[in-house]
Image (cartoon, grey):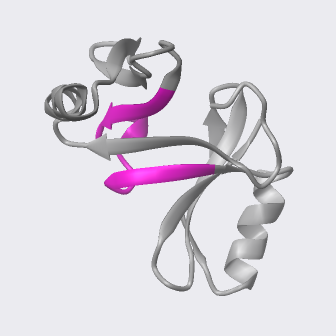
Amino acid sequence: MSDNPQIGKIGWIDMTVDDADGLRDFYKSVVGWGTEAVSMGDYSDYSMTSPSTGEAVSGICHARGSNADLPGGWLIYITVADVDASAAACTANGGEIVVAPKGLAGGRFCVIRDPSGATAALYQP
């Protein structure tokens, strides 16, 4: 997640897929990203890094373990002040909760689907 979280800002983007190793190699070749393995116990997910700065810019994750319930494809993480209040506002305004609020990276997150069908994660540092 972003080192400088600002409410309403997209703080991270990642992708959950069946073949994270293959997609890691695809984006290394196509975009030039580097990689840093992120241990998930018996396997690794990946932080993809900028070729010029080495800064983590996105993640590519296996669709298993703690990521098993996440939707496939790119997922943006929008920083919010209170993930529980934002989740309640989502359902009150015609959206739905895909993944209920839970802990992640020193904060809490949930995944929502808006009334148009698009998904996004909400992250509270």
Decide which of 74, 49 is in the foreground and name it.
Answer: 49
Horizontal side, residue 111 vs residue 62: left or right = right
* Residue 124, x across and y down, in percent: 76, 43
* Residue 78, x across and y down, in percent: 66, 52
Using the image, determine if residue 19 lies above or below residue 118.
above
Decide which of 5, 110 is in the foreground and name it.
Answer: 5
Q: Could you tell me which residue is drawn at 50 percent across and 43 percent down?
A: 13
* Residue 19, x across and y down, in percent: 16, 36
Q: Could you tell me which residue is drawn at 42 percent across and 32 percent down?
A: 59
Using the image, determine if residue 71 lies above or below residue 22.
below
Q: Could you tell me which residue is drawn at 86 percent across and 50 percent down?
A: 81
Question: Is residue 97 in the magenta section?
Answer: no
Q: Can residue 70 be seen in this view?
A: no
Decide which of 70, 78 is in the foreground and name it.
Answer: 78
Which of the 4 quarters of the picture holds residue 45? top left
Range of residues picked out in magenta: 57-77
Horizontal side, residue 37 vs residue 85: left or right = left
Q: Is residue 62 visible?
A: yes
Q: Could you tell me which residue is drawn at 71 percent across and 64 percent down?
A: 87
* Residue 95, x across and y down, in percent: 61, 79
Quarter that holds the N terminus: top right
